[in-house]
Image (spheres, helix red, strand yellow):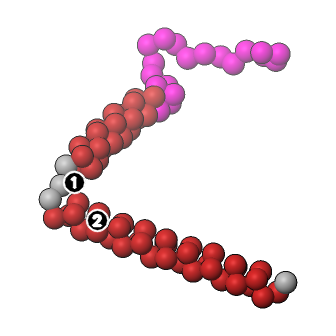
């Protein structure tokens, strides 16, 4: 931009940037294929595995709700007796 221009390579000779671009394009293609495969496997989550996952989430949610209700009761009792 402001200084001397860097000498450019002849058009026919591939440089290190060309090799990088080729590796990068290959890497991106592999990553896209992997992401597509993962999405398909995630969609295929059915049957016993999905049922077990759902049951585990339900149990966690129930325990969380119970803990919140107990915390609310504790706060109410503290505020009631402190006054």
Residue located at (65% from left, 16% from top):
7
Residue 12 part of the magenta-drawn span: yes
**Would you identify the image quadrant in which residue 76 lies?**
bottom right
Instruction: Calculate the distance from the C-alpha at mark 2 to the C-alpha at mark 1.
Output: 10 Å
Circle 2 packing at 10 Å, graded few (<14), some (14-19), many (20+), is few
Q: Are marks 2 and 1 in contact (CB under 8 Å)?
A: yes
Q: Give percent across and percent down for residue 81.
A: 78, 88
Q: Answer left or right for 15 relative to 1.
A: left
Q: Give percent across and percent down for residue 16.
A: 50, 30
From this view, report whether residue 71 is shown above or below residue 17. Answer: below
**Would you identify the image quadrant in which residue 74 lies?**
bottom right
Residue 24 part of the magenta-drawn span: no
**Would you identify the image quadrant in which residue 22 lies?**
top left
The residue segment tinted magenta is 1-20
Question: Where does the N terminus fall, quadrant-wise?
Answer: top right
Q: Give percent across and percent down for residue 34.
A: 30, 44
The residue at which mark 2 appears reads as: 53
The residue at which mark 1 appears reads as: 45
Element class at badge 2:
helix
Question: Where does the C terminus fall, quadrant-wise?
Answer: bottom right
Is there any visible trace of residue 22 in the rendered image? yes
Residue at the farthest left position: 47
Is there any visible trace of residue 19 in the rendered image? no
Observer-nearest residue: 21 or 32?
32
Residue located at (48% from left, 11% from top):
11
Observer-nearest residue: 44 or 80?
80
Circle 1 packing at 10 Å, graded few (<14), some (14-19), many (20+), is few
């Amino acid at each position: 931009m402001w200084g001397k221009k860097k000498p450019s390579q002849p058009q026919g000779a591939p440089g290190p940037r060309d090799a990088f671009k080729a590796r990068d394009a290959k890497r991106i293609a592999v990553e896209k294929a992997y992401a597509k495969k993962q999405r398909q496997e995630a969609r295929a989550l059915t049957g016993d595995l999905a049922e077990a996952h759902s049951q585990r989430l339900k149990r966690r949610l129930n325990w969380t709700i119970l803990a919140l209700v107990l915390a609310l009761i504790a706060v109410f009792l503290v505020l009631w007796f402190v006054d």
